[in-house]
């Protein structure tokens, strides 16, 4: 059996076709980050609250999500959510866009991970800052919003950036439920070539993820340096 030679030109030729679906990858990632941040904020609030039930639920949710592999949760949401919606509300959601199921999955995961980042960052701020803000006449809510959270945001930023990068990489799993994103398009190109050029196509995908990761990393570094001035 003749061995096929690695074709560098195929790597570059495939990039334009792959980049046409980069917007799908970014849309799923950005949507999951925004929604997951809101969920993470709520979970962090629950973990920091004085309500034992709230703390138990928030910590329990985080533990379950962190112990669940991403691809397992993706399959549970994709196959289980339509059945659950039909059983409870008689809703037919099987025809939803596959990207919606991907966003739901990665929102649940990102919320769990980022809640710990938010909680740890808030607890890292000296509580004397809060007491000083209250002592000069600010309300408890103003003290948290105007004094505590801005300082916690600076502390949380590096870990938040790492979580964003990890989410974008985990988003590559969305092709397993049939979503045609960057990786999904790569698999289609390989299938159209009867299984050939797999190495070249996946290397092209890897280059795109490298560039995205580098851009995100540099963006967060500049933001961190800007916010840390003074």
Image (cartoon, grey):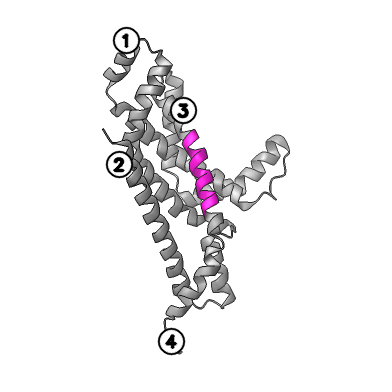
Residue receiving disc 4: 3
Which label's residue is closer to the chain start, 4 or 1? 4
SS class of the residue under badge 4? loop
Q: CA distance from mark 4 to mark 1?
A: 76 Å
Q: Are marks 1 and 2 in contact (CB under 8 Å)?
A: no
What residue sits 37% from the left and 45% below the top? 161
SS class of the residue under badge 1? helix
Please tell me whether the stretch drawn in magenta is mainly helix, strand or loop.
helix
| Comparing labels 4 and 1, the label whose residue is closer to the camera | 1
What residue sits 40% from the left and 60% below the top? 211
Residue 116 in which image quadrant:
top left
| Comparing labels 1 and 2, the label whose residue is closer to the camera | 2
Residue 49 left/right relative to 26: left
Residue receiving disc 3: 57
Q: Residues in magenta? A: 26-38
Placement of 7 over or under 50, stated as above or below: below
SS class of the residue under badge 3? helix
Q: CA distance from mark 3 to mark 1?
A: 33 Å
Residue receiving disc 1: 135
Residue 4 left/right relative to 135: right
Which label's residue is closer to the chain start, 3 or 1? 3
Is residue 77 in view from this perspective? yes
Q: Which mark is residue 225?
A: 2
Farthest residue, direction bottom: 2
Q: Are marks 2 and 4 in contact (CB under 8 Å)?
A: no
SS class of the residue under badge 2? helix
| Comparing labels 3 and 1, the label whose residue is closer to the camera | 1
């Amino acid at each position: 059996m003749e061995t096929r030679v690695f074709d560098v030109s195929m790597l570059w030729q495939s990039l334009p076709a792959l980049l046409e679906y980069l917007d799908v990858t970014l849309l799923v990632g950005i949507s999951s980050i925004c929604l997951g941040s809101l969920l993470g904020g709520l979970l962090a609030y629950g973990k920091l609250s004085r309500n034992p039930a709230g703390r138990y639920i928030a910590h329990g949710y985080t533990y379950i999500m962190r112990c669940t592999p991403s691809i397992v949760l993706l399959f549970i949401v994709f196959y289980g959510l339509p059945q659950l919606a039909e059983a409870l509300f008689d809703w037919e959601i099987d025809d939803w866009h596959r990207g919606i199921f991907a966003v739901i999955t990665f929102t649940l995961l990102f919320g769990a991970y980022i809640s710990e980042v938010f909680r740890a960052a808030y607890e890292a701020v000296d509580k004397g800052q809060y007491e000083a803000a209250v002592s000069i006449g600010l309300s408890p809510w103003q003290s948290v919003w105007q004094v505590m959270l801005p300082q916690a945001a600076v502390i949380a930023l590096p870990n938040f950036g790492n979580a964003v990068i990890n989410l974008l990489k985990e988003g590559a799993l969305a092709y397993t439920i049939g979503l045609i994103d960057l990786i999904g398009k790569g698999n289609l190109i390989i299938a159209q070539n009867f299984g050939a050029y797999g190495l070249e196509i996946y290397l092209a995908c890897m280059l795109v993820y490298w560039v995205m990761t580098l851009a995100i990393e540099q963006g967060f570094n500049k933001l961190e340096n800007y916010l840390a001035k003074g």
